[in-house]
Amino acid sequence: VALALKDTLSNFFAGFHIVVTKQIRVGDYIKLDSGEEGHVHDISWRTTVIQTLAGNLILVPNAKLTEMIVTNYTLQEKDMAVIVAMGVHYASDLAKVEQVTCEVAAEVMREAAGGVPDFVPFIRYHTFADSSINFSVILRAQAFVDQFTVKHAFIKRIHERFAREGIVIPYPIRALNYDQEKRG
């Protein structure tokens, strides 16, 4: 009997451990080391149910869940950093780029669904790349799933504003040297 109940008891005690430690709670957004991610929909005596963003339900035996590496995006704070990588032409006035980018990012924080209105966004230049000076824009979203709405709104607005301001977002260009190829 003990051998037959081994998995059931293992899942029961693992479920009890999950509920008591409160490291994973119903409503949390988690990502498993196996790649699955979503909101914790239910924690029962045998399984934990995770609902993906697409609406699918993933049933994970509690004993397996306690053995996995789990990233809980809502354990400490629900809001999170949203980083958008960008690049501008080498001829750009970097002070103007920073000012315009921060203005647009602040608008997005105030107006976009899921933005954190009191957060002051900022940028950090970091790379002299092949065709651009690259930087990261740091925004915040109220919850994990809000990052997609915030990025969407920011990219649309920054593209429009850069066009108005004459700030160029370059793209890589490849030049072919036919004379050199003929000699080879």
Image (cartoon, rainbow, N blue to C red):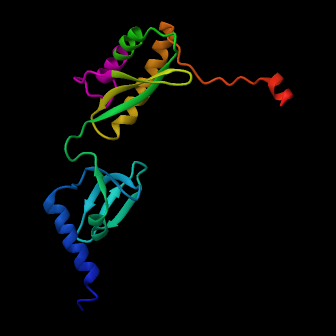
Near-viewer residue (143 or 137): 137
Q: Nearer the viewer, residue 114 or 102?
A: 102
Quadrant in the picture for the C terminus: top right
**Residue 109 placed where, x, y %?**
30, 23
Residue at the far bottom: name it: 1
Whether residue 114 is in magenta: the answer is: yes
Task: Based on the picture, tell me whether residue 29 belongs to the magenta stretch.
Answer: no
Q: Work out whether 96 lies above or below 63.
A: above
Residue occupying the far front of the picture: 184
Find residue 106 and report its horizontal and vertical position in percent: 31, 18
Classify residue 94 by image quadrant: top left
Image quarter for residue 150? Answer: top left
Depth check: give the residue in front, 67 or 1: 67
Q: Residue furthest left?
A: 20
Image check: 114 left or right of 151? left
Residue placed at 50% from the left, 11% from the top?
Answer: 167
Asked if residue 15 lies left or right of residue 105, the reply is left
The residue lying at 35 percent from left, 21 percent from top is: 123
57 w.r.t. 116: above or below:
below
Instruction: Give the magenta-colored segment's residue range.
Output: 103-122
Quarter holding the N terminus is bottom left
- The spot of residue 175 in percent (x, y) is 71, 22
Residue at image x 32%, y 27%? 139
Q: In the displayed structure, does residue 110 sit left or right of residue 149?
A: left
Q: 17 left or right of 55?
A: left
Q: Is residue 138 above or below residue 2?
A: above
